[in-house]
């Protein structure tokens, strides 16, 4: 058997498909036969700007879904034939990157998916759950026990990661406030958002604050799934109206001036689920997510836009991201 992979051969180069060996799982890993992969907006930025890559050739990709082909000696939660979705730790080594037919994933970064769920749907899960889960539980300190009171603001609730944050926050008991394009308002409400606002409205801050105060809800926590073009400053303004709070960003730092002292700002990093937040990541993927998928309290989101052509079309998907994709995630079936 061969393992085909879409590699970046040199800095800022276009992807090309090569044949490489099928890797062998370490004791804590599973080998997945990839049946669908999803791309993310950050992928084209890593390629075009030569970000985070230590050496070439390299393979990108974090979102995979498929069947378990082999398990490591210490693996207890999975067996050959299981249908899974997994977060690929692409910055570790090429064997653990998603844009290939056979990929290694850590047991604690993987989850079983129901028989009723397609692999394409499963590929929507990993990055969204990992990024928003780290933000909510690790950065913002929300207890994993649920039963939370009060409000939770998600900026860009119709995006891939934002829609994940909406669902997790709602599952933890929060009244979720979010902003999105009007055409996505009805959809994000199906994910658990209680209050939805038009992000382009110049009065959006006052609308959010007024709605929360009229409902008797305090907004002390926020997650900014965009972190560009002034969104972080806008989130800070909302929290400031409630005496301050905590804000977590998708990108590293706000591009604006320092926030007021009563607003604590941090950044989420998805790969923490396999690093310093490994125990939390294992709970999130092995326990919480698997159960939430079975009982329907977490749904793959957002919508799917299929890109045909398999690995040979990964570059096409990255180019589409560069032009802009709204309310959809680009998915490539591999059969």
Image: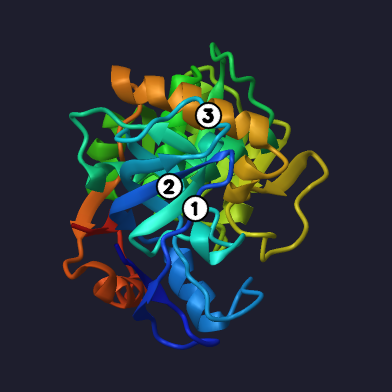
The residue at the point 35 percent across, 73 percent down is 318
Q: Position of residue 117 (x, y in %)?
A: 22, 34
First of labels 1, 2 by sequence position: 1
Q: Using the rendered view, name the quadrant where residue 186 is placed.
A: top left
Q: For the residue carrying disc 1, how many other residues have a C-alpha within 10 Å: few (<14), some (14-19), or many (20+)? A: some
First of labels 3, 2 by sequence position: 2
Distance CA(mark 1)–CA(mark 2): 7 Å
Disc on res. 284? 3
Q: Nearer the viewer, residue 296 or 189?
A: 296
Q: Position of residue 82 (x, y in %)?
A: 32, 33
Disc 1 element: loop
The residue at the point 51 percent across, 25 percent down is 76
* Coloration mode: rainbow
The residue at the point 48 percent across, 22 percent down is 287
Disc 3 element: helix
Q: Position of residue 107 (x, y in %)?
A: 52, 36
Q: Which residue is mark 1?
A: 24
Q: Nearer the viewer, mark 3 or mark 2?
A: 2
Disc 2 element: strand
Q: Does residue 175 appear anywhere in the picture?
A: no
| Whether label 1 touches label 2, CB < 8 Å | yes
First of labels 3, 1 by sequence position: 1
Residue 163, placed above or below residue 57: above
Q: Which residue is mark 2?
A: 31
Q: For the residue carrying disc 2, how many other residues have a C-alpha within 10 Å: few (<14), some (14-19), or many (20+)? A: many
Q: Nearer the viewer, residue 2 or 172?
A: 2
Disc on res. 132? none
Q: Position of residue 147 (x, y in %)?
A: 54, 11
Q: For the residue carrying disc 3, how many other residues have a C-alpha within 10 Å: few (<14), some (14-19), or many (20+)? A: many
Residue 211, placed above or below residue 99: above
């Amino acid at each position: 058997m061969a393992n085909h992979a879409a590699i970046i051969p040199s800095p800022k180069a276009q992807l090309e498909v090569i044949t490489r060996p099928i890797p062998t799982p370490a004791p804590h890993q599973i080998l997945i036969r990839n049946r669908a992969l999803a791309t993310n907006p950050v992928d084209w930025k890593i390629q075009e700007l030569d970000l985070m890559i230590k050496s070439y050739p390299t393979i990108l990709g974090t979102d995979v879904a498929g069947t378990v082909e082999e398990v490591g000696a210490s693996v207890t939660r999975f067996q050959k034939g299981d249908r899974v979705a997994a977060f690929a730790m692409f910055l570790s080594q090429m064997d653990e990157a998603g844009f290939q037919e056979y990929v290694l994933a850590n047991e604690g970064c993987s989850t079983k998916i129901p028989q009723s769920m397609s692999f394409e749907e499963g590929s929507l899960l990993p990055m969204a759950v990992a990024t928003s889960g780290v933000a909510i539980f690790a950065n913002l300190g929300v207890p994993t026990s649920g039963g939370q009171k009060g409000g939770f603001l998600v900026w860009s609730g119709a995006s891939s990661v934002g829609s994940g944050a909406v669902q997790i926050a709602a599952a933890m008991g929060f009244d979720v406030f979010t902003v999105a394009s009007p055409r996505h308002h009805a959809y994000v409400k199906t994910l658990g958002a209680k209050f939805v606002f038009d992000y382009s409205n110049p009065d959006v801050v006052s609308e959010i604050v007024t709605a929360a105060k009229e409902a008797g809800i305090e907004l002390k926590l926020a997650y900014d799934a965009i972190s560009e073009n002034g969104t972080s400053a806008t989130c800070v303004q909302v929290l400031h109206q409630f005496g301050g709070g905590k804000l977590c960003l998708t990108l590293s730092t706000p591009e604006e001036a320092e926030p007021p002292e009563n607003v604590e700002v941090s950044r989420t990093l998805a790969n923490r689920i396999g690093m310093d937040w490994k125990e939390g990541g294992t709970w999130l993927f092995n326990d919480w997510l698997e159960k939430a998928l079975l009982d329907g309290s977490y749904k793959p989101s957002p919508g799917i836009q299929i890109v045909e052509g398999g690995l040979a079309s990964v570059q096409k998907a990255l180019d589409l991201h560069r032009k802009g994709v709204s309310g959809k995630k680009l998915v490539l079936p591999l059969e």
